[in-house]
Amino acid sequence: MPLPVRSVFFGEVSLSGSLRPVAQAEARLKEAAKLGFETAVVPAAAGDAAAGAMAEVHALASLTALTDWVRAQHHG
């Protein structure tokens, strides 16, 4: 199943499957927007930093939530 087009994903996956933030989330998203990305999928803890940097932001807490989101994109 391909990932959604013009979407950027970043974060760290823990051994328990939770998604953790990475450094400089806001700067990463601003650069991604300059490169033409429209949707960002980030760890829940980075959601506040992501707000306003992209047109659409999905802040997810776990790898399970991420796979559910990707599946919904193909069935929505």
Image (cartoon, helix red, strand yellow):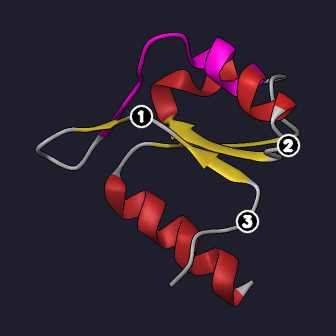
**Gap between marks 1 and 2, in whole Å?**
19 Å
**Marks 1 and 2, the one that precedes in the sequence:** 1
Q: Residue at x 56, y 78 (%)?
A: 2
Would residue 40 be counted in the magenta stretch?
Answer: no
Identify the amino acid type marked 1.
Answer: Gly
Q: Tell me where the magenta segment starts and ends, as one range.
A: 19-30
| Residue designated by label 1 | 11
Most extreme residue toward the front is: 35
**Gap between marks 2 and 3, in whole Å?**
10 Å
Would residue 20 be counted in the magenta stretch?
Answer: yes
Q: Nearer the viewer, mark 3 or mark 1?
A: 3
* Residue 68 in picture, x, y percent from top left: 48, 71
| Residue designated by label 2 | 36
> In the rendered view, does 60 fall on the left or right side of 31?
left
Q: Residue at x 54, y 38 (%)?
A: 42
Q: Residue at x 44, y 59 (%)?
A: 65
Q: Secondary structure at mark 3?
A: loop
Identify the amino acid type marked 3.
Answer: Val
| Residue designated by label 3 | 5
In the depicted structure, whether residue 36 falls above or below residue 52: below
**Marks 2 and 3, the one that precedes in the sequence:** 3
Mark 2 closeness class: few <14, some 14–19, many ≥20 residues within 10 Å: few
